[in-house]
Image (cartoon, rainbow, N blue to C red):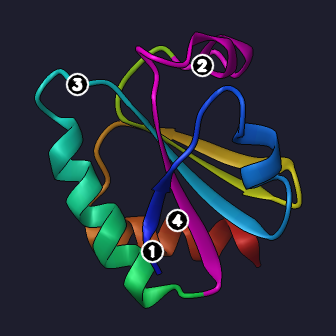
Amino acid sequence: MAVRPTSDQTFETDTNHGIAVIDFWQDIGNGATQAAVDKAVSEQLPDVNFFVMDVMQNHTIANRYQIKKSPTIMVKKNGKVLGTAVGYRPKEPLIAYINHLIK
């Protein structure tokens, strides 16, 4: 499954149904690394919706969820936040984190 962008305007619609993983990032040189992991994980977890949000362009949602560092990974199920992890997550630990939260 592809990793899709989301924004302040579409965040709630995009992430309030099913399982959603959101990678909050900003272009400071480390986002591309987590993005590559997100893509690989999305291919292994086809029932999970993956999104990226540029926090420099989308202040409303970043402020609402107090996103202070990049990358920050949020996992939601049917609109409810199950967990938030700050910092880069390699592929296998990210898969384990998501699976732990959605059980």
58 on left or right of 35? right
Name the residue that disc number 1 marks.
95
Name the residue that disc number 3 marks.
27
Amino acid type for the residue under numbered disc 3: Asp
Is 57 magenta? The answer is yes
* Outermost front residue: 9
For the magenta stretch, what is the residue range?
Answer: 47-67
* Outermost left residue: 29
Is 38 magenta? The answer is no
Do residues under tags 4 and 1 come within 8 Å of each other at their CB atoms?
A: yes
Task: Give percent across and percent down for residue 78.
Answer: 88, 60
> How much space separates mark 4 and mark 2, taking CA atoms?
21 Å
> How much space separates mark 3 and mark 4, taking CA atoms?
24 Å
Task: Give percent across and percent down for residue 55.
Answer: 46, 21
**Pointer 1: residues within 10 angstroms few (<14), some, or many (20+)?**
some
Residue drawn at point x = 26 percent, y = 64 percent: 37
Task: Give percent across and percent down for residue 92.
Answer: 32, 75
Query: Sequence order check: which comes first, mark 3 or mark 1?
Result: 3
Query: Sequence order check: which comes first, mark 3 or mark 4?
Result: 3
